[in-house]
Amino acid sequence: MPGMAVLFLGAGLLLLYGLISRRRVAGYLTGPMLFVAAGAGAGFFWHAGGTPDAENLTHIRLLGELTLAIVLFTDSARLKPRRLLQEENWPARMLFIGLPLVVLAGAAAGYYLFPGWPVLLVLLAALILAPTDAALGRPILEAHDVPRPLRETLNAESGLNDGFALPPILILLAIMSGEAAADLQEGALTLLRHLLLGPITGAAIGFGGGWLIGMAAQRKWMRPLFERLSAPALAILAYAGAELLNTNGFIAAYVAGLMIPLTVGRPAQDYLKEFSETEAELLTLAVFFLFGLMVVPYGAAAWDWRMLAYALLSLTVIRMTPILLSLWGSGLNLRSGALLAWFGPRGIASVLYLLLAFEALQPNGNLSQLAGLVSLTVLLSIFAHGLSAVPLARAYAANPQALPPPRRGKAKR
């Protein structure tokens, strides 16, 4: 599809959705739904079902990396770390117990549904589809009908599980591409470096940068425009700094955002929030449009009933059962636990990790199968979670149940 036509269509969609963004229909027809559908329609119309151009995929991947880093940063900047630590340990349970179980369940389902696939490819698909999307989860994160502890738990989980899934994906891609031997010690060191050095880098950059922003804003050295632009600057600094150190940029970006409430005053925080609601949204919609335009038509050629079955299982049983098990004994009631288990949308992270697989494994006959499975699952998730966010939030509010008190037993100050 000609580049100018892509630009024209994308800008037209943005204007059209903006015109109805405050109408009731916009609560059900989310931006990602509209943009991915339009992109896919244009891709099929322009016969874009062949293998995507490597250069174009690289551009989409870079855009996806920057978008994900900025979204993670701006979402975590809304949290108050002290308050989050006073709540239940639900995010830790979902990350350290639920996420590995989701990967194992996904690998088991793929092993039986796709008997002709190599085992490593099945495991790679399970890892790519395990992390959830903070951007697609925003409708529920902003639904005040849902209690704040549940929204902050979903925020923390979706912000960190992207980074947790990335190290094993990189290790697996290195093994599959023949660039590295299956060395368990080397893999363990890579995982440890990502999960330790990434947060340290993010905390250092976020705290130092936030302190400088807070000081300059307090002394009226900064114009409001640059207070707002400091959000993407810090997010990209944390992400790129961690990547230069060969560690996890996504975890670094999320942790950097957590430092903002500790270092930046309320006026500057308001400017950061304005950014997250404008420029970050624009980047997110651009990624979903390009995903629909270039990846969905290519993956659609491989769709079959087995992929549909896996996609449906991935969004329900494979995701929900492990998350509910991880929350067992936490004191959280079943209704609230089911809400946390359901809202695990797949989006930018899964698309980004699929593009990493394209670069590492191409040419490879299995890529079309992997693209088909990931694209179908993400596509179904965009619509299933987008359509269900508002109704489920209202249903929860209509029959509220008290959340259990923090297990730590500490009074909030």
Image (cartoon, rainbow, N blue to C red):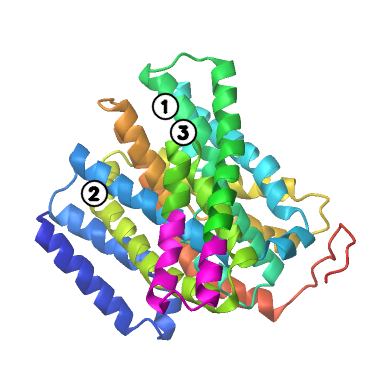
Give SS at disc 1. Answer: helix
Give SS at disc 2. Answer: helix
Q: Which mark is nearer the camera, 1 or 2?
A: 1
The residue that appears at 61% across and 53% down in the rendered structure is: 157
Label 2: how many Cα within 10 Å (few below 14, some 14–19, many 20+): many
Question: Dots 1 and 2: beta carbons under 8 Å?
Answer: no
Q: Position of residue 72 (x, y in %)?
A: 50, 56
Q: Earlier in the sequence, mark 1 or mark 3?
A: 1
Query: In the image, is residue 224 part of the stretch drawn in magenta?
Result: yes
**In the rendered view, would you say 59 is above or below 277?**
above
Query: In the image, is residue 404 part of the stretch drawn in magenta?
Result: no
Tell me which segment is drawn in magenta: 210-235
Residue 96 can be seen, yes or no: yes
* Residue at mark 1 to residue at mark 3: CA–CA distance: 16 Å
User: Residue tagged by mark 1?
Assistant: 173
Q: Which mark is nearer the camera, 3 or 2?
A: 3
Q: Which mark is nearer the camera, 1 or 3?
A: 3
- Foreground of the two, 50 or 58: 58
The residue that appears at 67% across and 73% down in the rendered structure is: 396
Q: Which mark is residue 294?
A: 2
Q: Earlier in the sequence, mark 3 or mark 2?
A: 3
Q: Which mark is residue 246?
A: 3
**In the rendered view, would you say 65 is above or below 141?**
above
The residue that appears at 64% across and 78% down in the rendered structure is: 145
Q: Position of residue 84 (x, y in %)?
A: 71, 61
